[in-house]
Image: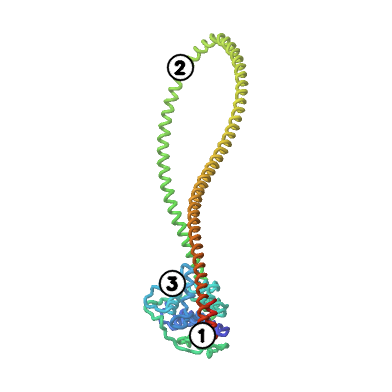
Amino acid sequence: MAMERANLLNMAKLSIKGLIESALSFGRTLDSDYPPLQQFFVVMEHCLKHGLKVKKSFLGFNKSLWGPLELVEKLCPEAAEISASVRDLPGLKTPLGRARAWLRLALMQKRLADYLRLLITRKDLLSDFYEDSALMLEEEGAVIVGLLVGLNVIDANLCVKGEDLDSQVTSTVRPCCCSFSVKCGWFPIPNVSLIFFFYCFHDNRNSQIASILDQKNYVEELNRQLNSTVHGLQSRVDSLEKSNSKLIEELAIAKNNIIKLQEENQQLRSENNLILLKAQQHLEVAQGDVSLERDAYKQSRQGLDEMYNEARRQLKEECQLRQDVENELVAQVSMKQEMELAMKLLEKDIHEKQDTLIGLRHQLDEVKAINVEMYQKMQSSDEEMKKKNNVISRLEEKTNQITATMKQLEQSDKELLSQTRTLAMSFVKCASTDTEHQYKLVKDISF
């Protein structure tokens, strides 16, 4: 398994490198008939099939790539569109065809490396589909996923709908004869010599292409970040425009309110001036009235002082009376509290007695029910006793009858026995000779 992983890693490196270099040299969009692209898909298919567990079915044993690739939909919601498109394709009938279509769509979307990176991070899920030493579960799988990042510089335009992906024809070439240091088996790779051609004749451009790829990857990553920033700023601009339109509407409403308030303020100021003039006139009239009243007050103050002294004396008397009434009220309140306490105690005693009375009533009802039940049982037992006495009397009569019958049978038995013995003896006497047989017969009859 280690040698196979190493061979597959080298094959993937050569395939990806040859595909990138050929695509950059031609400088055009790749289609389905491009040979390096076909070689790349075959190599990726073998990399993903390495260590895949064999599943039993009604038709035999098979290895399906569609199972692990279908997990990407759960790990990344953005991949749901690719999976749905693959399922909707009418020409695909096998899981292998769906897996091949998924690889082509992911490459066109430039998210193949991202999807496979998410997949290899979940080894707990991949262990259901791959063996322990499979390429996708080892370091070689992570290296291949890292190499796939360079394919983002390629623009692929693949027609998946009209292509026969269920039965793809390939040719077999032995990769161990191509300067590999590790021995490996047969792999179906079409036109693999083109990969080694680019690998052998483009060594002098490796450094330039590597720097160009690094710059392009950096520019694309920067472009992605800028696009995400632009999208965020655009959403913020939209939200700010919405809030700005709301603020403009609120400003117009506020301006209208300010104009209305200014008009009301002007009207209130004019009314305030009129009220001030009227108040001044009333104040002048009131001042004249106050001067007249002051003179009258001075004249009547002496009488008011006398009245005040008299009222003060009456107030003292009223205060004394009020103090006496308050003392009496405190005494009445204390008496009332004592009476309320006594009433509460009486109510509590009454409630307790009522509870006791209710309990006694319940006990009385239970005793009555028990008495009624005992009376009913006694009546039923009396009826049963009468029935049993009748049965006993009948049984006694039958017993007496049976006893009389037995006595009669015993008497008849005795008479019959005596008659039998008499007959036996007479038979013995009448016999001319006594034989043994006759003797036994007489003996049996006698007994």
Label 1 CA crowd tier, 10 Å (few <14, some 14–19, many 20+): few
> Considering only vertical position in the picture, is 1 above or below 320?
below
Which mark lies nearer to you, 3 or 1? 1
Name the spot of residue 346 as percent of width and height, x first: 59, 31
Q: CA distance from mark 2 to mark 1?
A: 191 Å
Q: Locate the C terminus by quadrant.
A: bottom right
What's the residue at 40%, 35% (across, down)? Answer: 263
Classify 23 as above or below 261. Answer: below
CB under 8 Å between callouts 2 and 1? Answer: no
Q: Mark 3 or mark 1: name the one nearer the start of the chain.
A: 3
* Disc 2 packing (10 Å; few <14; some 14–19; many ≥20): few
Colour logic: rainbow
Residue type beneath disc 1: Ser
Q: Relative to the observer, which residue lies in front, 110 or 397?
A: 397
SS for tag 3?
Answer: helix
Mark toward the viewer: 2 or 1? 1
The residue at which mark 3 appears reads as 83
